[in-house]
Image (cartoon, rainbow, N blue to C red):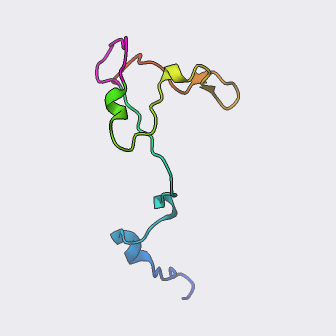
Amino acid sequence: MSVGQSPPRHDAAAKTDGSIEYAGDAVPAGALHAVVVFSGRAHARMLSMSTDAAFAVPGVVDIITAADAPVNEYGLTMRDQPALVGVDHTGA
């Protein structure tokens, strides 16, 4: 390689065709995945919720709602933002 030339990338083809695994693609053994569910109705009030059907799905470990986190404030300097909240608004 000389001045003004890019170094050869021996892994370029594998990176572009998807055959190489990046560190961010690795899933540790026993890892859990979270799914956030949003309201499908604008301005609706959720009066109750049954999680029975969701718990019946194979692999579901737990379901967490705002009611499960009575002290859920977070923030960089002031803990004034809730992590889990009830539905107030949907859409743009």
Residue at image position (47%, 79%) is 9
Q: Residue furthest right?
A: 77
Provide the residue span drawn in magenta: 39-50
Task: Indicate the quadrant containing the N terminus: top left, top right, bottom left or bottom right.
Answer: bottom right
The answer to whether 67 is drawn above or below residue 12 in the figure is above
What secondary structure do most residues of the magenta stretch adopt?
A: loop
Q: Position of residue 36 (x, y in %)?
A: 41, 34
Q: Residue furthest bottom?
A: 1
Residue at image position (37%, 19%) is 49
Residue at image position (52%, 81%) is 7
Name the residue nearer the viewer: 66 or 38.
66
Q: Position of residue 91 (x, y in %)?
A: 33, 24
Q: Is residue 45 magenta?
A: yes
Task: Indicate the quadrant containing the C terminus: top left, top right, bottom left or bottom right.
Answer: top left
Name the residue nearer the viewer: 89 or 59.
59
Q: Residue furthest left?
A: 41
The tally of labels here is 0
Q: Position of residue 65 (x, y in %)?
A: 47, 25
Name the residue nearer the viewer: 77 or 28.
28
Q: Is 92 situated left or right of 33 in this image? A: left
The answer to whether 18 is drawn above or below residue 83 in the figure is below
Quarter holding residue 83: top right
Q: Position of residue 89 (x, y in %)?
A: 38, 18
Q: Is 15 situated left or right of 69 in this image? A: left
Name the residue nearer the viewer: 57 or 31.
57
